[in-house]
Image (cartoon, rainbow, N blue to C red):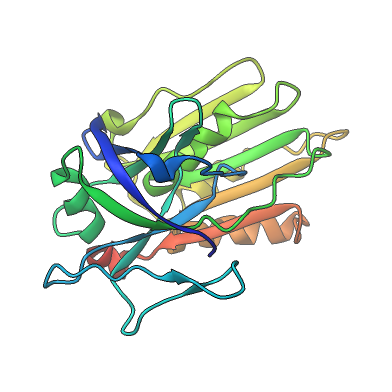
Amino acid sequence: MTGIRELAVLRREQVTPRMARVVFGGPQAAGFASLTPDDHVKLVFPDPDGAVRPPTLAADGETLDWPRPFPPTREYTIRRVDAEAGEVWMDFVVHPGGLASDWAMSVEPGERLWVAGPRPGEPVDERFDRHLLLADHTALPAVARWLEELSPSVSAEVAVLVPDADDEQELAVRDGVTVTWYHSVDDPGDDVLGRHLESVELPDGHQTYLWAAGEAGLLKPVRRWARARGFARGTCDIAGYWRKARTRNL
């Protein structure tokens, strides 16, 4: 993951009861670039004793040299980059006991955080005129940005699983874009997104790109569906962001 910079917290906003937004800025935000909606960065947090040990740029000018032992870090999606305003947005799912969650809920304007990355991602090939997006709550920031940046010539079908109706967000829905919300309080099974896919049609004459992210177990039925329908490397991206057994470490 290339690039390391210290960003200042400009403000904190509560997006939904379980989602907080931290907006970063400061001199080192200049030139911050993110090419794809699911670009992510490593946030470098202080050690328990308060010491901060960010990586340094290696001699090749492209890679990072990380200190040992490895500092406390968490990976987060970039919700939005506003170059004109000099702002970088990141959204955090908040829950008791999480390192990044606790930080996001208590941070004050003026505090600083070291941010490593993002590694440049590959935009989806323009030949895909239909995007199929599936996500849980943790991948909702990427979905929200994806729809904001979606080309007018591309249609999208979206399914998102959130804890309950209060966690739904207003997304950039337009003609050609449909969003279906599922609530884990009503349907806690791991096959929610897989069952959604059983009703999805892949219309002739269109090239569909599949993107899915969230809890690893939730994505198992998605992977099976994708394999059965011939999705291969370059036509899909399915990424496990977390595992239920590791919830306390988020």
35 vs 202, nearest the viewer: 35
Mark yes or no: residue 174 visible: yes
Q: Quadrant of residue 35?
A: top right
227 vs 147, nearest the viewer: 147
Residue 210 rendering spot, x and y as whole percentages: 66, 47
90 vs 56, nearest the viewer: 56
Q: Is residue 127 left or right of residue 44?
A: right
Q: Quadrant of residue 224?
A: bottom right
> Where 75 sits versus 35, above or below?
below
Q: Residue at x 43, y 26 (%)?
A: 85
Q: Residue at x 22, y 52 (%)?
A: 101
Instruction: Give the mark count.
Output: 0
Q: Residue at x 28, y 35 (%)?
A: 164
Q: Quadrant of the C terminus?
A: bottom left
Q: Residue furthest top?
A: 175
Q: Residue at x 26, y 42 (%)?
A: 185
Mark yes or no: residue 20 visible: no
Residue 227 rendering spot, x and y as whole percentages: 71, 61
106 vs 187, nearest the viewer: 106
Residue 232 rendering spot, x and y as whole percentages: 76, 60
Q: Is residue 205 left or right of residue 195?
A: right
> Where 47 sits versus 67, above or below?
above
> Where 191 sits versus 21, above or below?
below
Residue 200 rendering spot, x and y as whole percentages: 65, 38
